[in-house]
């Protein structure tokens, strides 16, 4: 092994995601970088929309324009598109909160000096997915009745009776067991993979920088890392969008089983 | 503006905290070797030669290494992150749904209403303007028609006046001619009678001079008058 690469020791994956506790160590309220970033994302989300709605100028500009466009983006492209005009408009505030909270957490992945998305830990995606899952079941029971909800979700109409032997267990597993799991893991795994990917390019670049003649290969991981950073910006937006649109689909399905 | 700078200050502080407090990623982990040396099993091993390593010590070393290498399961959520995540998401929901979104939507609805009003007013103004324009055009057309009518009337009356004047003039001329004719006739009459008298006298004087009292005056006059009458009747 060349000397330069001998110095290259890739840390265990846990070292990329486990952060030392800053205060309140040993309590359930222990604060580490993940918690601080989650709070920062919450502040950013609120700050963005509070600043954007404060002036209420007739001709919007700056923050106001951005906040209004963002709200309309969620309303038109996610809520109304998936849930219809009436339910869509009613659920837009919730979906907007979800989208921007997740987006700001995701985007920390590429912010220099921070470079860690709290969504690459399972806790937040799991929490949000379970909240959505509980809302889905609760709203389904509320609008269709307990029996009606389980009938419409486990016994889809238009299927020959015999096939229910097959369809009902599949529907149960997919709707009530796999759905929250895939919902959470899709976001979590994407962000985790992205973080590992960026770390890999960064560590490779650092190792080659310290190497001797190997430094001629330095442009490869540097360019790759830059490209991957751009790609991860796309992933950050896309995963927030997917999480939110799936939320709209699940909740919309409970409100209108016929769709 | 004051609120805005306060929010920005809080954001800057938070960002600083995020970058500064938790340190760098590697701070949380140690290399496997250090971990083994620091573990109870590792301490026993340090300083022994290869021969002195007995089988159970090797086993202990293996266990210690396993423990060090084994990472926390990434699919098991940490309780503190769940709790804080829940709190923060709740804050986001309340902040957006209670404060930001209603204000945002009110602003957007106000603008929508304002624009709709403006458009309606513009439409109304346009219709009014068109109505006024057509009314003006109507008035203009009426005025033109009126003017044409007046001109036509004037022309007609002027024609009338002219005809009247011409007729009057013709009548006057006829009168003048008539009087002239009468005058001429009278003058002719008078001249004729004067001439008759003078010619008679002249003829008598002439005859007297020629004949010298051979005939008395009365007889001569009678002779001449007879002659003239004869001439006059034959000439008619």
Image: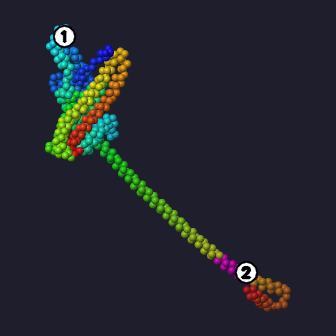
Callouts 2 and 1 on one subunit? yes
Closer to the camera in the image, A50 or A247: A247
Q: Which mark is residue B191?
A: 2
SS under mark 1: loop
Q: Give residue A188's quadrant in the image.
A: top left
For marks 2 and 1, the one nearer the N-term is: 1
Q: Position of residue A24 (x, y in %)?
A: 17, 23
Residue B203: x and y in percent read 80, 85
How many residues crowd mark 2 within 10 Å: few (<14), some (14–19), many (20+)? few
Q: Quadrant of the N terminus of chain A?
A: top left
Give the distance between the C-alpha atoms of the residues marked 2 and 1, in whole angstroms.
188 Å
The residue drawn where x is 78% and y is 89% is B227
Q: Chain of mark 2?
A: B
Q: Please state the chain letter of the residue tagged with numbered disc 1 in the rendered image.
A: B
Q: Does the magenta run of residues contain A156?
A: no
The range drawn in magenta is: B178-195
Q: Is residue A195 visible?
A: yes
| Residue A143 in view of the camera | no
Q: Which mark is residue A244?
A: none
In the picture shown, does residue B198 fall above or below A259?
A: below
Contact? badges 2 and 1 (CB < 8 Å): no
Residue at which label 1 appears: B46
* Residue A32 percent coordinates (x, y): 21, 24
Number of numbered tags placed on the structure image? 2
The secondary structure that dominates the magenta segment is helix
> Which residue is painted at 34% across and 27% down in the image?
A227
Looking at the image, residue B89 sits to the left or right of residue B207; the answer is: left
Which label sits in the foreground, 2 or 1?
1
Magenta residue check for B194 = yes
Query: Residue B96 is drawn in which quadrant?
Result: top left
Q: Relative to B221, does residue A165 appear above or below in the rendering? A: above
Residue A130 image offset from top left, x and y in percent: 19, 34
């Amino acid at each position: 092994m060349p000397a330069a690469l001998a110095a290259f020791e890739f840390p265990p994956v846990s070292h990329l995601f486990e952060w030392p506790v800053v205060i309140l160590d040993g309590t359930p309220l222990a604060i580490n970088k993940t918690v601080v970033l989650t709070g920062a994302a919450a502040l950013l989300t609120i700050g963005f929309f509070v600043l954007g709605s404060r002036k209420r100028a007739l001709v919007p500009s700056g923050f106001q324009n951005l906040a209004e466009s963002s709200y309309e983006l969620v309303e038109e492209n996610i809520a109304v598109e998936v849930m219809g005009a009436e339910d869509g408009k009613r659920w837009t505030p919730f979906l907007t909160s979800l989208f921007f909270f997740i987006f700001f957490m995701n985007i920390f992945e590429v912010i220099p000096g921070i470079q860690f998305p709290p969504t690459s830990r399972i806790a937040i995606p799991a929490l949000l997915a379970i909240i959505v899952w509980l809302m889905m079941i609760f709203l389904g029971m509320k609008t269709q009745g307990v029996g009606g909800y389980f009938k419409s979700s486990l016994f889809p109409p238009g299927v020959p009776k015999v096939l229910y032997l097959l369809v009902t267990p599949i529907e149960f597993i997919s709707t009530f067991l796999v759905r929250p799991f895939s919902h959470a893991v899709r976001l979590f795994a994407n962000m985790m993979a992205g973080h590992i990917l960026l770390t890999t390019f960064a560590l490779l670049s650092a190792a080659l920088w310290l190497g001797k003649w190997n430094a001629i290969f330095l442009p490869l991981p540097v360019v790759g890392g830059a490209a991957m950073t751009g790609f991860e910006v796309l992933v950050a937006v896309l995963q927030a969008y997917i999480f939110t649109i799936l939320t709209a689909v699940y909740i919309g399905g409970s409100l209108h089983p016929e769709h | 503006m004051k609120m805005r700078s306060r929010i920005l200050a809080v954001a800057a502080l938070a960002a600083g905290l995020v970058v500064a407090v938790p340190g760098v990623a590697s701070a949380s982990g140690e290399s496997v070797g250090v971990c083994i040396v620091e573990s109870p099993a590792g301490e026993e091993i340090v300083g022994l030669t290869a021969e002195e390593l007995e089988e159970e010590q090797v086993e202990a070393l293996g266990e210690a290494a396993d423990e060090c290498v084994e990472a926390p399961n990434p699919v098991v959520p940490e309780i503190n992150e769940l709790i804080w995540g829940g709190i923060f998401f709740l804050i986001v929901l309340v902040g957006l749904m209670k404060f930001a979104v209603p204000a945002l939507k009110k602003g957007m609805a106000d603008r929508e209403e304002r624009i709709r009003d403006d458009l309606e007013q513009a439409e109304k103004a346009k219709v009014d303007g068109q109505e006024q324009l057509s009314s003006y055009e109507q008035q203009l057309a009426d005025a033109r028609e009126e003017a044409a009518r007046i001109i036509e009337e004037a022309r007609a009356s002027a024609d009338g006046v002219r005809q009247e004047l011409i007729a009057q003039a013709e009548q006057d001329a006829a009168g003048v001619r008539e009087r002239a004719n009468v005058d001429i006739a009278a003058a002719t009459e008078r001249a004729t009678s004067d001439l008759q008298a003078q010619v008679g006298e002249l003829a008598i004087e002439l005859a007297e001079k020629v004949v010298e009292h051979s005939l008395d005056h009365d007889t001569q006059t009678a002779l001449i008058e007879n002659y003239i009458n004869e001439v006059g009747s034959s000439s008619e």
